Image (tube, grey):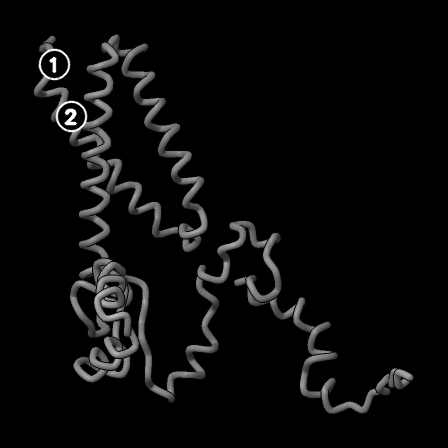
């Protein structure tokens, strides 16, 4: 049986880490609430790293230093693979790829951060971008800036983004203004419509008058 050399072992680690990064990015496509799961993902990453380090020492009889090196190789391969996959996907395969806009804005939201920090007048940056490209411009990997009035009905009919769900990742823990479930929002809105809807406002209601202070 051919012995595995250190070079071959490192190559296998790179390959396995790269495949894991691609697989992780593929799994991300099945969820749209990742923005509110950041702490869970950090915790999972720490647990995974500690598990790999422990297994390398106990199962493969590596020294702590060698295990740390293997972990660094694995983390680097995973991160590079994941980052490359994300950038390629955002640039050429994302659902918003057909909308015009600065190429850097396709890849990262840092484009908007840089432009905003540079002038502190991001609204003027958006105005120039719309003049250059169109009334619908891609200003981020998952963001569009729209100045077309006729598009308002379609925009307001869309489901809320995960931005509104920042308080909790569980749907049952969200308030009426935060929920992204259309049926849940419709059900919880009914009591409010009685008092705050157009009908409730127009209906005559007795107004209590407080006695005039002496």
Circles 1 and 2, Cβ within 8 Å, touching? The answer is: yes
Assign the C terminus to one quadrant of the image: bottom right
- Percent across and percent down for residue 164 are 49, 62
Assign the N terminus to one quadrant of the image: top left
Q: Which residue is mark 1?
A: 4
Give whichever of 6, 115 is nearer the camera.
115
Q: Residues within 10 Å of mark 1 (few under 14, many from 20)?
A: few
Instruction: Please report the residue visible at 35 percent of the width from the left and 23 percent of the height from the top.
Output: 50
Q: Residues within 10 Å of mark 2 (few under 14, many from 20)?
A: some
Give whichever of 213, 153 is nearer the camera.
213
Q: Secondary structure at mark 1?
A: loop
Q: How many marks?
A: 2
Eyeballing the image, is 74 above or below 42?
A: above
**Mark positioned earlier in the residue sequence (1 or 2):** 1
- Percent across and percent down for residue 26 are 30, 47
Eyeballing the image, is 162 above or below 211?
A: above
Q: Which residue is mark 2?
A: 12
- Residue 63 is left or right of residue 41, and the answer is left
Residue 59, image quadrant? top left
Find the distance from the CA under tag 1 to the CA under tag 2.
10 Å
Instruction: Please report the residue visible at 19 percent of the width from the left and 41 percent of the height from the top.
Output: 81
- Percent across and percent down for residue 73 are 18, 28
Residue at the limit of the structure toward the front, as seen here: 214
Numbered label attached to residue 175: none
Instruction: Please report the residue visible at 33 percent of the width from the left and 79 percent of the height from the top.
Output: 146
Eyeballing the image, is 26 above or below 10?
A: below
């Amino acid at each position: 049986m051919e012995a595995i050399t250190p070079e071959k072992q490192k190559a296998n680690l790179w390959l396995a880490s790269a495949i894991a990064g691609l697989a992780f990015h593929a799994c991300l496509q099945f969820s749209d609430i990742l923005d509110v799961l950041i702490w869970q993902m950090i915790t999972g990453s720490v647990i995974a790293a500690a598990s790999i380090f422990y297994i390398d020492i106990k199962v493969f009889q590596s020294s702590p230093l060698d295990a740390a090196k293997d972990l660094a190789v694995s983390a680097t391969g995973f991160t590079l693979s994941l980052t490359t996959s994300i950038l390629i996907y955002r640039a050429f395969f994302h659902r918003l790829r057909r909308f015009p806009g600065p190429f850097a804005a396709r890849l990262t939201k840092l484009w908007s951060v840089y432009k905003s920090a540079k002038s502190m007048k991001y609204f003027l940056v958006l105005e120039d971008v719309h003049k250059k490209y169109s009334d619908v411009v891609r200003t981020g990997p998952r963001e569009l800036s729209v100045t077309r009035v006729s598009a308002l009905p379609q925009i307001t009919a869309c489901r809320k983004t995960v931005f509104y769900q920042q308080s909790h990742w569980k749907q049952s823990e969200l308030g009426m203004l935060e929920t992204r479930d259309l049926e849940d929002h419709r059900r919880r809105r009914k009591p409010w419509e009685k008092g705050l809807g157009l009908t409730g406002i127009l209906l005559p209601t007795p107004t209590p008058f407080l006695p005039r202070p002496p």
